[in-house]
Image (cartoon, grey):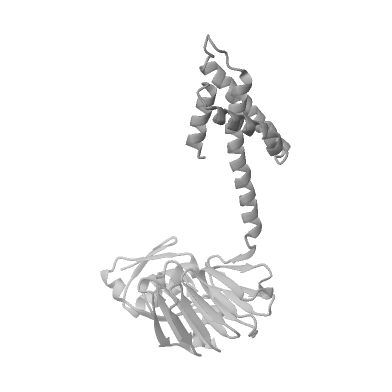
């Protein structure tokens, strides 16, 4: 019986229009309150009793009893109790379900980096992770004891050196792809501002798969670039050692778009880079940005590539 049918039944009950069977149902339901009450916390019980009283009082005031036949206030209380208890039952079941859900939710350790930060993490299984600037990963508690060692790269870039353990594959999960390894070193780049995710292998072998099951297998010095729009991989040769140079304070861009260049500059210096040159979207950048350089030195180098000029105002740099 849904809430609408319940209200109609109660209305008939209060107006003495319910059938004998319906009256019996309501009376038995109300009498079962004691059984329900035992399973409720004291605070909840008091709350429900108060609601029953307030509901009954409102009903009596708004529905004066007929002159010929006077309804017993207990009938109002019974009807009110049923409505409140029906709601209470739903609330209690919902609370129990929520508690069970919370208990079943896994617990994670979360690590983040800010502008210009690179963080090194030693994992319980002996693996090592470096986090690039403006990145975030989650590691499930006790992950080294799980069937698979799952690391969630929610944002940014990370370089992994994974301890070999064939019995417990190491998985790096992003929003779009999952990289599976047994023991190897590789880089995953998955910034949300980019339209791709790139996995570059330095040593060993990895399998990269998306949510549709499309897979790429990488060997040393190979890169899989996954298009978020096309849902496809582009395989290319790429120096695996070069992919990790940001760990040492040097970000290497290869055939990078202006968007990726701007993202890298912002991650290192906290500076917003924009362009008023319409040709900017067609430019590609091959450059190594040393984190030890100042932003002015770096911008001078960037502008020299396509013979641009730039203007800086506080933390905003405009190319033209």
Residue 45 placement (x, y as % from top left): 69, 34
Residue 243 placement (x, y as % from top left): 50, 82
**315 vs 175, nearest the viewer:** 175
Can you see residue 305? yes
Quadrant of the rendered image containing residue 316:
bottom left
The residue located at (70%, 38%) in the rendering is 35
Above or below residue 206? Residue 292 is above
The residue located at (48%, 30%) in the rendering is 8
**261 vs 15, nearest the viewer:** 15
**2 vs 274, nearest the viewer:** 2
Residue 278 placement (x, y as % from top left): 26, 69
Q: Which corner quadrant holds the C terminus?
A: bottom left
Above or below residue 205? Residue 95 is above
Quadrant of the rendered image containing residue 37:
top right
Horizontal placement of 189 versus 104: left or right?
A: left
Above or below residue 33? Residue 305 is below
Residue 191 placement (x, y as % from top left): 46, 69
Q: Residue furthest front?
A: 20
The residue located at (52%, 12%) in the rendering is 66
Can you see residue 118? no
The residue located at (65%, 27%) in the rendering is 50
Q: Residue furthest left?
A: 278
**17 vs 237, nearest the viewer:** 17
């Amino acid at each position: 019986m849904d809430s609408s049918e319940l209200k109609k039944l109660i209305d008939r009950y209060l107006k003495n229009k319910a059938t004998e069977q319906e009256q019996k149902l309501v009376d038995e339901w109300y009498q079962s309150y004691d059984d329900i009450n035992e399973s409720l916390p004291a605070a909840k019980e008091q709350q429900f009793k108060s609601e029953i009283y307030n509901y009954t009082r409102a009903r009596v005031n708004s529905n004066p009893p007929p002159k010929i036949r006077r309804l017993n206030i207990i009938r109002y209380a019974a009807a009110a109790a049923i409505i409140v208890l029906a709601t209470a039952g739903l609330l209690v079941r919902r609370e129990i379900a929520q508690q069970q859900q919370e208990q079943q939710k896994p617990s994670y350790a979360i690590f983040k980096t800010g502008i210009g930060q690179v963080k090194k993490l030693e994992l319980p299984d002996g693996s090592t992770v470096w986090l690039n600037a403006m990145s975030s990963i989650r590691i499930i508690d006790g992950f080294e004891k799980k069937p698979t060692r799952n690391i969630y790269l929610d944002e940014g870039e990370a370089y992994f050196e994974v301890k070999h353990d064939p019995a417990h594959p190491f998985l790096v999960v992003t929003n779009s792809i999952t990289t599976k390894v047994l023991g190897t070193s590789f880089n995953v780049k998955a910034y949300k501002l980019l339209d791709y995710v790139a996995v570059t292998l330095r040593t060993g072998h990895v399998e990269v798969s998306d949510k549709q099951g499309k897979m790429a297998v990488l060997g040393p010095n190979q890169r899989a670039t996954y298009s978020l729009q096309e849902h496809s991989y582009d395989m290319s040769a790429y120096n695996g050692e070069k992919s990790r140079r940001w760990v040492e304070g040097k970000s290497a861009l290869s055939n990078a778009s202006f968007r990726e260049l701007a993202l890298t500059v912002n991650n290192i210096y906290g500076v917003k880079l924009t362009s008023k040159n319409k040709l900017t979207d067609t430019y590609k950048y091959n450059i190594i940005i040393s984190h030890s350089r100042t932003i002015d030195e770096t911008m001078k180098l960037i502008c020299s590539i396509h013979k641009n000029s730039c203007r800086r105002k506080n933390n905003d740099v405009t190319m033209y």
